[in-house]
Amino acid sequence: MPHYETIIGLETHIQLNTKSKIFCSCKADSWGDPPNTNICPVCTGQPGVLPIPNKAVIEKGILLAAAMNSDLRTVSFFDRKNYFYPDLPKGYQITQYDMAIGKGGYMDIPTTNGETRRVGIEKLHLEEDAGKTIHKPNRRLLDFNRCGVPLIEMVTGPDLRSADEAAEYLTRLRQLLRWIGISEAEMEKGHLRCDANVSIRPVGVTILNPKTEIKNLNSIEHVREAIEVEVKRQIKAVEAGEKIESWTLDWDEDTQTLSKMRSKETEADYRYFREPDLLPVRFDEEEKTAILAKLPELPLARQARFEEEYNLPEYNAQVLTSERALSEYFESTVQAYAGKAKLHKIARQVSNWIMNDVLALLNEKELSAEELQLTPQHLATIITLVDEETINTATGKDLLLKVEASGKSPLSIVEEEGLAQVSDREVIRDICAQVITENPGQVAQYQAGKKGLIGWFIGQVMAKTQGKADPQGARQTLQELLEE
Ligand SMILES: [Zn+2]
């Protein structure tokens, strides 16, 4: 349906990775813990208790607001959002309303056609989570572990134009949250939750039509699928002359269908007012500077710098900056290895080793780059050994695994196992001559024109040297001897 445009806004709830909850000292991350084991009088809303703000939550909020290009409010307020629900023991949620920590902002995301989509941020505020209701036949069970877990709610403007763009935004947001170290951002564990607001309009029209809100999207893939299903439904309805109503829809991942939920409360139903038990959140320029000093170079900026500074192809730069630890591993290796050739050449070589061998290792062992025993210095040493032809490439790849498995230095393994390449010309020549003498049949075939056999001869030489011969040298010597 090319004559309709899709309008999407995403509402995300980000669980911060602090040790304790937002207003008490209970453990924040209860993943896998038995129900109601991380609770206290404060987070279960007992009479007479007072909340105490967690400084780490405020700092992480400031970091995200800065990373999203929001204006930071040096004075912000907490408010009460009142509603009654069994998993909200206080009867209200402490959140931020009109004077939140961040004001406005945007995130730029690359789109598939090579352009950049600027996604505006309409809301960015701190709040506490509610508990969890577990529905069983004829009864409801309540788990309050999640009460008071720190969240940032972030709402985009209606700026995304396709299910793919929505997925890209979430992928980039997840990357950013992990990069700046404020959330584990695992959607399956509820660290990053997303609702999607979807509407359509004829191309060229600028008004916004009523939107529907899709809930219960537990992965980026589900966000994409649910939006696609909903856009098709809306187009079909409009084409049939029906009106789109502002429903809240529930995504069922098993059947890939949407069903209508209860109608949503309006803002007025929440009767917001300032939280009287908490002082305003204030920080001065000095504190702000100290916190923002912890903000690293952001993923897209680092990707652009890698392309520019190291002359890497876009794809390589993107893979190497997919995680902050990996990007730092790359730069440390380049630095450890630098000084021998031009930076661009070094960078390309390091990038190839990391993308081919180190990434395979990381995936297999499910590790992050910072957890490797194979340090950037070790990797730089291995690349140098291959460069200087002390070992051949195959041995280098093998050595990399041995260093990771043992934690020993590459040089000590090369020495212990006698891995240094046999590059002494005389020795190679003797071994090649031996192979030729032992295999008259293959020699005859080769000399009769079956030149492809050269690979087989090289294999024999490699076998006799336990893989330590330089294959290029062996090829040359064998060719010389066979042509004689
Ligand atoms: Zn508590």
Image: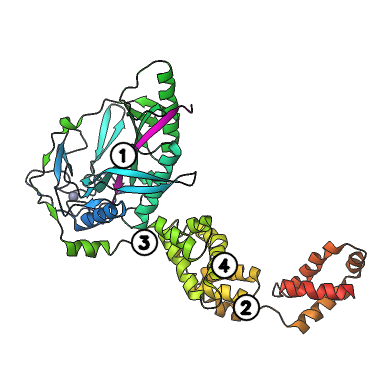
Amino acid type, label 4: Gln
Instruction: Give the residue number, with chain letter if any, for mark 2.
Output: 388
Q: Which mark is residue 224?
A: none
Residue type at the position of mark 3: Glu
Which stretch did the figure color magenta?
1-20
Most frequent secondary structure within the magenta stretch: strand
* Label 4–label 3 contact, CB within 8 A: no
Disc 1 or 2, which lies upstream in sequence? Answer: 1
Q: How many marks?
A: 4
Residue 45, x across and y down, in percent: 14, 43
For marks 2 and 3 on the same chain, the one whose residue lies earlier in the sequence: 3
Q: In this orientation, which residue lies closer to the viewer: 438 or 236? A: 236
Circle number at residue 349: 4
Q: Is residue 42 above or below residue 228?
A: below
Q: Secondary structure at mark 2?
A: loop
Residue 157, labelled with which disc? 1
**SS class of the residue under badge 3?**
loop
- Distance in Å between CA atoms under marks 2 and 3: 34 Å
- First in sequence, mark 4 or 3: give its number: 3
Amino acid of disc 2: Glu
Q: Earlier in the sequence, mark 1 or mark 4?
A: 1
At label 3, counting other C-alpha atoms closer than 10 Å, the crowd grade (few under 14, some 14-19, many 20 or more) is some
Along the horizontal axis of the image, is 351 left or right of 157? right
- Which dot, 2 or 3, sits closer to the camera? 3
Cα separation, mark 1 vs mark 2, equals 55 Å
Q: Residue at x 41, y 32 (%)?
A: 6
Q: Is the residue under label 1 in contact with that under label 3 (CB below 8 Å)?
A: no
Question: Does the magenta-highlighted stretch encompass residue 419?
Answer: no
Mark 1 or 2, which is nearer the eye?
1
Q: Earlier in the sequence, mark 3 or mark 1?
A: 1
